[in-house]
């Protein structure tokens, strides 16, 4: 007899604007290439690292972009 219950579907409570961005998401938002995003990281663009993954917090990126460079 299999008594295991099916796992509930994963429901995200985050709206798309609250989730972390990938480099592709950010490049699309800004309208530039992923290579330019990499250059911006070296210039101080705030990132979040999960092991080998790089993500960007939308609000932190927007604040950084508004700062005079």
Image (cartoon, grey):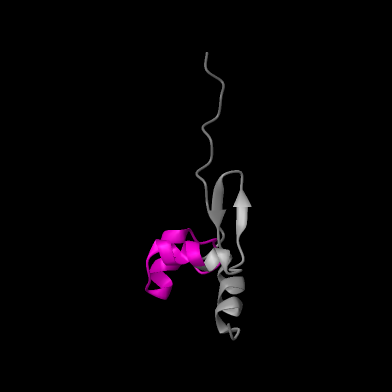
Q: Which residues are magenta?
A: 16-39
Residue at 59%, 86% (x, y): give it.
68
Question: Residue 15, how many percent across, how many down?
Answer: 52, 65
> What residue do we see at 43% from left, 67% from top?
36
Q: Is residue 16 visible?
A: no
Q: Is residue 24 left or right of residue 9?
A: left
Residue ID at (38%, 71%): 32
Q: With respect to residue 30, does 37 lie above or below?
A: above
Q: What residue is rendered at 55% in x and 70% in y?
A: 58
User: Image quadrant of residue 65?
Assistant: bottom right
Query: How far across and how far down the image is residue 50, in percent?
Result: 61, 48
The magenta stretch spans residue 19? yes
Residue 2, given in percent of the width and then of the height, sits at: 52, 17
Rendered view: 62 above or below 68: above
Q: Looking at the picture, how far across and down is residue 56, in whole percent?
A: 56, 62
Q: Is residue 39 visible?
A: yes
Residue 56 position (above or below residue 65): above
Magenta stretch: includes residue 38: yes
Q: 33 or 61, which is in the foreground?
A: 33
């Amino acid at each position: 007899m299999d008594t295991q219950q099916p796992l509930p579907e994963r429901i995200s409570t985050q709206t798309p604007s609250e989730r972390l961005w990938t480099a592709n998401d950010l490049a699309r938002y800004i309208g530039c290439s992923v290579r330019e995003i990499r250059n911006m990281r070296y210039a101080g663009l705030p990132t979040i690292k999960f092991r080998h993954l790089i993500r960007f917090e939308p609000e932190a990126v927007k604040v950084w972009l508004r700062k005079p460079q």
